Amino acid sequence: MPMFDAVESTTHGDSLEGSDQFTGFPRDTRDLPSLMLSSCYPITLRFVDVCYRLKIEKRQKGSRSNIRRILGHGPTHDQSNQTSMAMIQERTILNGITGMVSPGEILAILGPSGSGKSTLLNALAGRLQGPGFTGTILANNKKPCKQTLKRTGFVTQDDVLYPHLSVRETLIFCSLLRLPKSLSKKEKTLVAESVISELGLTKCENTIIGNSFIRGVSGGERKRVSIAHEMLINPSLLILDEPTSGLDSTAAHRLVLTLNSLAQKGKTIVTSMHQPSSRVYHMFNSVLVLSEGRCLYFGKGSESMAYFESVGFSPSFPMNPADFLLDLANGTYALIAVFLSLL
Ligand SMILES: Nc1ncnc2c1ncn2[C@@H]1O[C@H](COP(=O)(O)OP(=O)(O)OP(=O)(O)O)[C@@H](O)[C@H]1O
């Protein structure tokens, strides 16, 4: 891809000649803003057999005594003995998830609530550790190193932004905090301004963020600010947890168009999504459908319907592929349980 020309020679290395180790920004910052959004170090992300198991304490009679404790009526001796009879149960949150996504592509993780989307995104971002986590995650065929993790932007479901700052103040403030010391204050401000323009936030740059008590930017603009916040570090891999939740179909479409334009610039994008419209669905290069922690489908979004038709599942009338996949993942079709048990 032409936009990778600047880094082609270091495709699998972790040193970017002539650029900052932290951000991949060019050291020569004369044309910093435009360069920062157009060049990035390509990351191909592969994940193989990702599993996550949790040990969960299942209390047999504890819930009642817990309520009594909250209400200030401490448990009796007998009840406290019952509480201690807790059973440890193992729960599988992710079960053998495999897939990959390349620079320039959007991988969408679809699935009903509780199917493991956020857990998988956390795993891909290197935020999931502990004995319950197994499997392999590779960035450019290597275990992600510190530099790769620094080039990973993670937009969480619940963004934490300062309600009293304007969009512009928020991004300049974050830019001053997050960008390396090698850049001057003026350069950091330029980076923030360029991100504001890239994310289509110019119109509301002087509006305060706000919260449920103070009126501020709209829900869609707020999501864009969260993405802009991560864009400040010029990530090669951008992971987003439900970036369209709470948005209407048009705002969601606009936001995914923005993600698409970021992907076109060579970024690798992984996003979870609850209920994409069909026009949003068609913008995904690949789709991974989760159902109770298992992978129901991984492949091109455009081929999912043909695949399910080939194994005996097809809707009785034309419908949005995303709705159909979610119906399948929710077990709406009786035979899907049998199909899942064969996976
Ligand atoms: N640390 C934890 N302790 C107990 N249960 C957990 C933990 N982490 C995840 N889970 C459970 O794992 C399941 C998957 O959670 P996850 O947040 O990944 O789902 P999700 O698909 O992102 O859901 P949503 O769309 O509602 O955000 C849920 O049932 C959740 O309760």
Image (cartoon, rainbow, N blue to C red):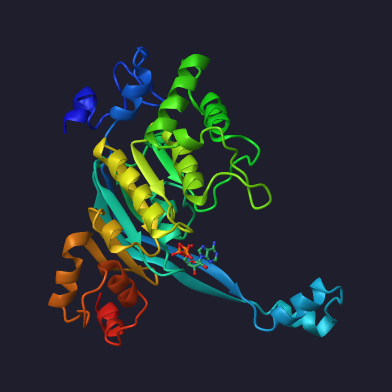
Q: Position of residue 232 (x, y in %)?
A: 44, 31
Task: Please say whether residue 233 is visible from this viewpoint.
Answer: no
Image-quadrant location for residue 110: bottom left
Q: Position of residue 227 (x, y in %)?
A: 44, 41
List the single residue furthest toward the bottom: 334
Q: Nearer the viewer, residue 167 or 269?
A: 167
Q: Give above or below for 116 relative to 14.
A: below
Question: Which quarter of the figure is the C terminus placed in?
Answer: bottom left
List the single residue furthest toward the front: 203
Q: Give above or below for 149 relative to 27.
A: below
Q: Nearer the viewer, residue 91 or 162?
A: 162
Question: Which quarter of the figure is the N terminus placed in?
Answer: top left
Image-quadrant location for residue 43: top left
Answer left or right for 94 relative to 284.
Answer: right
Identify which residue is drawn at 29% across, 71% down: 325
Identify which residue is drawn at 60% across, 38% down: 208
Identify which residue is drawn at 25% across, 46% down: 105
